Each structure stands twice: as C-alpha cells, then as structure tokens.
Amino acid sequence: MRARYVAMANGPLSRPKLPGIKGINDYKGHTFHTSRWDYNYTGGDANGAPMTNLQNKRVAIIGTGATSVQCVPHLAKSCETLYVFQRTPSSVDVRNNQPTDEDWFNTIATPGWQQRWLENFTANQTGGMASEDLVMDGWTDLSRRIQARIRTLPEAERTPHGMMAAWEDSDYEKMNEIRARVDDIVKDPKTAEGLKAWYRQLCKRPCFHDDYLDSFNEPGTHLLHTDGKGVEQITETGLVANGVTYEVDCIIYASGFEVGTEHKRRAGFDLTGRGGHTLSDHWRDGMKTLHGTHVHGFPNAFIVQPTQGANLISNVPHNLTESGQTIALTVRHTLDQGHQEVEVTDDAEAAWVEILLSGPGRMIGSQDCTPGYYNNEGLDPGPGAKFHVGYPQGASAYFEYLKQWRSCGQFSGLSFRDKPEAFPD
C-alpha cells in the first residue's frame, strides 16, 4: 500500500487484550470482548435500547476497569444473573452527568469557546495557573484539590518533599471520600468492602460513573472479588474463582487493550521507510520522534498520538486536535512550496528526545502500585519505557510551544526536498 502522505492515527489503545486465564479456549458458551459487542446475542443497540435477549441469561463479565464500569449498569438491568469478576476494585467517583444549563452555556459559547475549554481543562488538570474551572469534572476536581493543598503550605515548606507530602495528603483525603461513597450507595456491607479502592488515586485510571455502584444493589448482580488473584480457570461451562465454579451462558471480556507492546503488533502493520528500514526497527530500543509526530527516515509520514508530545492521559482529543493542525500545516507548506518530501532531521529528532529525557519521567503507574496498564501489570517495563514521556514543562507548555512552532512558519527541525529519494520496490 503506497501513498504520498501517510498519517497514522491508530490510537494507543486499539488492539483488544484477552486475559491469560487457563482454559480460556475450552469454554463452549457464547463470548465476546467489550470492544466487539455482540448485539445479535444481547439484543439492544449502541443507542441504549434494552438488551432484552439477556433476561433469562447468566452472564459473567471479567474486569472492573473503565470499560466495565460503563457496561455493568446496563447488564445489571438486563441479565437474570450477572457475575462481576474483579481482580482489583476501581476508584469510582461521582460523574454528576446532567444536561448543561442553556443560559449558562450561552454566556460561555462565544467564538473560540472550544479551544478555550480545551486549554482550560489542560491547565486545570496539569497544574497550570487557571483562574476558573470551566469543565468542573472529576479530573479537574482532583487536580485543583492538590494545587489548593500545596498553596496552603508555608513558603519554607514549598520544597519538592513538602509538595509531595501535600499531594499525598490530598490524595488520601480524596480516596477516603471515594471509599465512603461506596458505603453510602452499596447496601450489602461485604460487597461494599470489596468495591473499595485501597490504593492511591493515580495507581490505576480513575473512573467516574453515577450508576455503577448502585448496580450491585440489583438482586441478580453479584460481585466476585478475588482479592488480586483474578479468575483461576475457565471451564467448558463457566469460570472458577476463589475455588468456586460458576456456570454461565456468556462470558464478556472487559479486559482492555494492549499497552506497551510493539507498535507493529498494535497497529497491525509496519511502516517501511528509506532503505527498507521499518518503523519497528527504528524504535527497537525505544520511541524516537520530533513532537511525537515526525520520525527520521520516514518522509511524508506523520503520527497522531500523545506520547513524546503533551502526553496528556485523560483528554486525548486535545492531543489529536493539535497533531491534526500541525500535520495539515506541514503538508500545506510542502505543497505550496512545490516540495516533494518533508522529513525531520536526525539531529532534530535526537535533540527532541534529549529534551524529553531531561524531565522527571513518568508521574503515574509506580511499580509499587497494584498491577495495571499504567505500570505494565507490575512487570519490568523494559528499557524503551523511559521514552514514553511528554514535554518536561507540561502539557500546557507543550501546546503553547507547538503553537509558536507552527505560527512562525519556519518548521524548525524539518527538511524539505524537491525530489523524492528512491525507495525499495
């Protein structure tokens, strides 16, 4: 497959992952992954119609992460019996989802409001100096709490150690609120205890939902908390957990997506650059780019993704918007100037990686945390993990830097050629 320009927007979470459970291929009932939802089996549709085909079914869902938190409320209302198999409880805070007040929105929605909201969310979530919170969701609440706690420190205590201690205090306070919310909503004390996240807020991806916890008050919904062990085995007719066999008609895998595996595996293809050099070869020892978008040796190719850019984990569309603008302007300039190729230089790529590695590294997913995709399931992430970082000054600073890089029109670090270099057949 050949094209003059290639923009890869596969996304970092796109290849479904199945759990490595003994006997997974032995099961004779119906099964599917949440990203391949089988409405022919469940009934209903993507618009929220009731899943009427499940009313006489015993269903198991494996996993209690961000996807399962969204699925369980619908399944709990549809299944005769729903077993929720949990390795580690998620942190589930209030989402407070409700219609936006039209009168209030009309005071906000002046020209450019979308960009202002993007920037406001980023500033609030990543420690910027935002004077107000336009979004007011769980992510911004978490960040603003930490900032407020740090601002209360006396000047002499605003050291790295003092600020980290304040962060710990804020985190502990917030997690206690989330645990107390479980007791307020879930009626059965044993079930409530099993649903309490016992770790730090950013050890796993925080979740926000208004109906998930209440699902466990449905008489047919059962939490199978395995205290970190997970499902022991899958049989021809069901699952084994905590030494007990549960026979079910359907198993739904809410086990997420591959993270950190080879790009070629996750994308489903490999990109071939100059001299037959592949992208997987170029990144064998770790990712190397300029701005997370341009790769040396791969002219007219661009990547749309957050790593080595803003690296903002919770509002991915902001990254995509900025990448799209950057790529569009780069291609427009190439065409307007009559060039055939655009490519980042080797020196510019190396300089950008050096800037990235001068920062503090990853701020989430400590190896001390409970296993999850933030910390490669608690396993050694390998030498390439150190390159999965963002701009050291933070997301807001990166977006401002990129805006200036685009607007000056010099496209610093890129090389333009009037004649394309030969590629292998």
Image: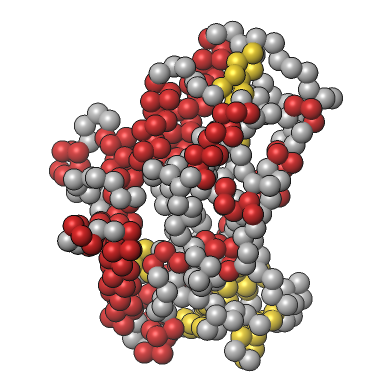
Which of the pair 103/408 is nearer the observer? 408
Q: Quadrant of residue 62?
A: bottom right
Q: Would you say residue 348 is visible in this rendering?
A: yes
345 on left or right of 424: left
The residue lying furthest to the front in this view is: 156
124 on left or right of 52: left
Above/below status of 410 relative to 218: above
Above/below status of 48 relative to 9: below
At x 75% / y 26%, what residue is drawn? 274
Above/below status of 397 relative to 407: below
Q: Quadrant of residue 250?
A: bottom right
At x 38% / y 25%, what residue is drawn? 404
Which of the pair 159/238 is nearer the observer? 159
The residue lying furthest to the right in this view is: 425
At x 41% / y 78%, what residue is drawn? 198
62 on left or right of 91: right
Q: Quadrant of residue 334?
A: top right
In the rendered view of the protein, which quadrant contains the C terminus? top right
